[in-house]
Amino acid sequence: MDFTFTDEQQMLRDSVSGFLTKNYDFDQRNEIVRSDTGWSRDIWRQFAELGLLGLPFPENQGGFGGGATETVAIAEPFGAHLLAEPYIACISLGGAAVAAAGNSDWLEKVMNGDAIAAFAYEEGRGTADPIQVTMQATPTDEGFILTGEKRMVLAGGEADILVVAAELDDELGLFLVDPSADGLSVTSYPTMDGRRAANIRFEAVLANSIMEKPGEAIRTLLDNAILAICAESVGAMGALMKQTAEYAGTRKQFGVSIGSFQVVAHRMADMKIAYNKARATLLYSAALIEAGEATQKDIAILKGQTGKLGREIGEAAIQTHGGVGMTDELSVSHYHKRILANDALLGSSEYHLRKVGTLS
Amino acid sequence: MDIDFGSKLEDFRAEVGAFLDEAPTPAIREAGRKLTSVFAPFEQCMEWHQILHKKGWAAPSWPKEYGGTGWSVEQRYIFAEEYRKRDLPPLLPQSLGMVGPLLIDLGTEEQKEKYLPGILGGLDFWAQGYSEPNSGSDLASLSCRADADGDDYIINGSKIWTTYAHHANRMFMLVRTDNSGKKQQGITFLLLDRVDYEGMEIRPIVGLDGSPEQCEVFFDNVRVPQSGRVGEENDGWTVAKHLLKHERGGSAASPTLKRGLERVREAAKSTPSGFGSMMVDDPVFQRDMGELEADIASYEHFEKLAVSGHPMANDPSFPSMNKTMNSELVQRVSVMITRVTGTEAIPFQNEALRVGANVEPLGTDLDLVAMPYYLNSRATTIYAGSNEVQRDLIARTVGREG
Ligand SMILES: Cc1cc2nc3c(=O)[nH]c(=O)nc-3n(C[C@H](O)[C@H](O)[C@H](O)COP(=O)(O)OP(=O)(O)OC[C@H]3O[C@@H](n4cnc5c(N)ncnc54)[C@H](O)[C@@H]3O)c2cc1C
């Protein structure tokens, strides 16, 4: 057993961290988030140059064949820097969907940074499992027709191509939809954690089927996306812990640092325990996924624990900061918001923890 | 023991209900539905305050001779219940709940005459200028200075976290007038009859929910009259401690908590649990709701015992226990709201949240307020004395009861 990064994986992680430290500090990040587009095409282009956009895709599809560990190696730094660019949206979800369907045209554009692919899956209030998708695809002579609504489609507003999950003959299929297609209406908005998403209404929209009878492919795609999401949250948790420890050591009240009050010190200890639990589960789950041994229960444990422990850490960080923890100016609340948004995506911790208990 | 609220009170409930159904304007109702903080949207809140004042109902807990309603504790509780049921915006606590009662107790006749009508009538809003960048929990270490000069004081320094200072036209504050003794001894309590004195600057702070609620207030040689002092010079700590009693308890908070749960339950009827039923029928959700509801019930019982004059309320740590319980329940209710709204709480919808906005919310009213309310509620365990500090106070009294 070995759950450490290889030298190459460590180098990858360091290079992403180094790049973000240089180009993506909190002020730079906020400027990007406040811009009209909400994320930076320039950063995206540099991600393409660094090979990050092709990282998780198989080599025979032109990617770099990165596995679960590579995903963790880059997504933790993403979380630590509160990335606004749609990596999870366009690579872990949209790109992974076109890759799974073997659509090399779109995949190539995605890997080059020339196209944004978004995955239209969520239907509101947490579509935690593929069997909860209700949108129907109806076959016609011209192609398939989709009607219904997808919500919280990450990067849905700026997508060049939508990959839509819809039911066909009681199985989930994947469909390509041109965002300018007739019958489509897109309402985009910023999310509270500094990303962009959209609600998308489909009124008899014409779609191309790219994957029918996908078997386990969609679940695998979602499992990998959950890993990326959780790694991002754990990266945010690490940043929160570090920042809170620094603050507790320097903030003085009653003539001493607040970290010297036992209740504050113990809360810091609990944050550290929570962080180590979450990171252990993250690394272990990555190894399971890479070995092809992750069960649905393992994935539910990962998502459930990350959401729960992340909330604990975020709330503890704000409380320890007192009034300044309540401001937009400090990054503390932004990390907490990212953790909360990630918790809500693809099934909340409440859902997944219960699921853990239902699986033997 | 007597749990009877009295049969006459059903008439009273009906009278209150009828007024609350008819008096608020649509904008006031909207402000109540869009509430994401204990501090309601300012403009509608003050308008509502003035309407309630015309009816004579702005300050139920004030003594009758100062404009209170003269209601019994039961009537006050019923009023709070009917109020919350309708999601009406609560009146701001700083004027009516803090500086008003303080002036009634400790103000000079001149101060009462000058200020109480504006406070009661909702014409003035008073900001509370206590905390400073380096003096939060350790408030007594405050350093914003006031030097006597003729009939005036000259103030230098700054305040922070001053809620709604950007809306205020008056301010009550603590200043340092002496450095020679214990830190508590050199503090003076001042009333500022305006906040646009030369040398005064107010800068809003954007909160984690994206809205400005607190402010920084800077004082650069600001000259204010000494007639604004409450109590003696250097005796401001005693005055502030007296006011804290009003800040930390004595109101009816459980109806707000109960209303929050009711909204969650309503939303849970149409939210799938992911396990085959709607959340409201899901046993796990029911267990979690049950636990929270039971805790809120115990808090309500505690609160009702207190208003009935039960000796439990004489415990020196009563205000601290009350503040700790209420703040933590507020947070738990807010978490429950985000749980039932799920991904629908993730869009950032500050524009739709504004009263009178032209923007349609993406989902329900509850979806709209869920996340900002949750985020804003993180403050309840920080302000008015953090819960850590409250627990220290409570711990000191353990073993001394009865
Ligand atoms: C939303 C909001 C509204 C506010 N409104 C006003 C207002 O209108 N007017 C005003 O004057 N102030 C206001 N405040 C300020 C508030 O009173 C202070 O935030 C509070 O006193 C805590 O001070 P601090 O923020 O400096 O935190 P700190 O005192 O620095 O505390 C940081 C952390 O250390 C802990 N800590 C500190 N001392 C101890 C101790 N002895 N033992 C154990 N733990 C300790 C605290 O509990 C907290 O977790 C407001 C604050 C907020 C968040």
Image: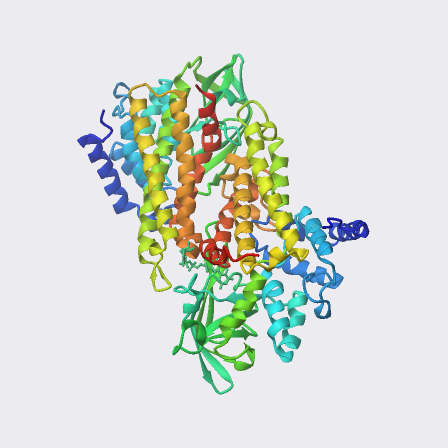
Q: Is residue B93 left or right of residue A248?
A: right
Indicate the quadrant of ligand 1 in the picture.
Answer: bottom left
Give how far across and how far down residue A213 sits, in percent: 44, 12
The answer to which image quadrant residue B99 occupies is bottom right
Q: Quadrant of residue B370?
A: top right
Placement of B78 over or under A285, stated as above or below: below
| Residue visible at 49% across and 47% down in the picture | B375
Q: Position of residue A23 (x, y in %)?
A: 28, 46
Does any portion of residue B398 appear in the rendered image? yes
Quarter placement of the C terminus of chain A: top left
**What's the image's color scheme?**
rainbow
Q: Residue at x 66, y 53 (%)?
A: B28
Q: Which image quarter is the N terminus of chain A in?
A: top left
Residue placed furthest toward the left:
A7
Is A343 drawn above or below residue A1 in the view shown? Answer: below
* Residue A216 drawn at (x, y percent): 40, 16
B388 and B115: which one is in front?
B388
Q: Residue furthest bottom?
A: B150
The residue shown at (73%, 52%) is B20
Residue closest to the eye, B378 or B155: B378
A249 lies above or below B167: above
- Describe residue A64's horizontal placement relative to residue A96 as left or right: left
Q: Position of residue A48 (x, y in %)?
A: 28, 33
